[in-house]
Image (cartoon, rainbow, N blue to C red):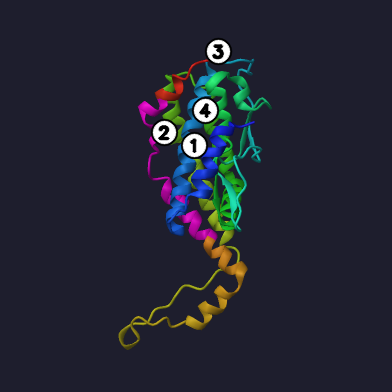
Amino acid sequence: MPDRDEARIERFRHKLIERFSSDPDRALEHGLARNGRVAEALCFMALIRDPARRRRPMLPVPNVGCTAAVRQFFRADGGEQAAHLLPGQLSIDGIFPWLFLAGPAARKLENLFAYVEPLRADYNKADSAAEANGLTDAFADACSRVLTGRGAAEADIVAAYDRVWRPGALAAFRAADEQKRSKPTPPPVIRGVGLEYGMILNFDESQEACADESIWATHEQLSILGYYRAAMAKEPRQLQPRAIREILALPPA
């Protein structure tokens, strides 16, 4: 089970402290937080590949998969849903990854898969669309890249993020966007010019489309996916050398 003390902190941070942030802010923050947790997961893969740290055998070319999440610190309420930060539950040769480690490293890695944020349902729908279009594969492939790497751990972590996770995630967000656009969406706003400057010329059409909940939901999910793409441009702090070394220096037991 994930760390109970950490779960208590997460519940307080997300559910008891009122958060004053707009939807664009939250979408961007969720994307940035996901990237940071992915970077941390890659660091733990470097620990697992170290025979001196590994607590159980691993295949020379491990079978790395990513499926639906099984851990979470809390359930959302008030009409929101708990949106996981990592794209799914990683497995190595069919085994939870934290079972390859011991001590603080094992506990922190298990916690990593339990982090969630309380968000509107549209976030989970956008996440699910991206996951179905390659986001989980990008995560698994990046982890596999570190597990099988033969270079310096720090360099392999950064390379897996930059050359596997980043392009794979961007491709998944684009594919999810294209999939969503195959459904009805609100018409583009047509603004007047000249004497009609400032007026929305197709106001009635736009209003009618937005009154349809399914059309509005698709519009919201497309917006969220756009902010996820924007988040990929910023390097997470967890990818900085000091942050990587902090995880690699965790005691073995």
Pointer 2 residue: 238
Q: Where 117 sits versus 223, above or below?
A: above
Question: Marks 3 and 2, how far apart in space?
Answer: 24 Å
Whether residues under marks 1 and 3 lie with C-beta atoms below 8 angstroms apart, the answer is no
Give the residues drawn in magenta, as a range: 221-244
8, 174: nearer the viewer: 8
**Residue 234 belongs to the span the image colors magenta:** yes
Along the polypeptide, which appears first: circle 1 or circle 2? 1
Residue type, numbered disc 4: Arg
Give neighbour class at mark 1: few <14, some 14-19, many 20+ (Cα, 10 Å).
Answer: many
C-alpha separation, residue under disc 3 versus residue under disc 4 = 17 Å
State the image quarter where residue 121 is shown: bottom right
| Residue 76 in picture, x, y percent from top left | 60, 50
The residues tagged by marks 1 and 3 sit, at their Cα atoms, a distance apart of 24 Å
Q: Residue at x 49, y 42 (%)?
A: 34
- Circle nearer the viewer, 3 or 2: 2
The Cα atoms of the two marked residues, 4 and 1, are separated by: 17 Å
Dot label at residue 37: 1
**Marking on residue 51:** 3
Q: Are marks 4 and 2 in contact (CB under 8 Å)?
A: no
Disc 1 and disc 2: Cα gap in Å?
A: 8 Å
Q: Position of residue 109 (x, y in %)?
A: 55, 28
* Overall secondary structure of the magenta section: helix
- Residue that numbered label 4 is attached to: 145
| Closer to viewer: mark 3 or mark 4 | 3
- Which residue is depicted at the point 47% across and 72% down? 188
Q: Is mark 2 on a helix, strand or loop?
A: helix
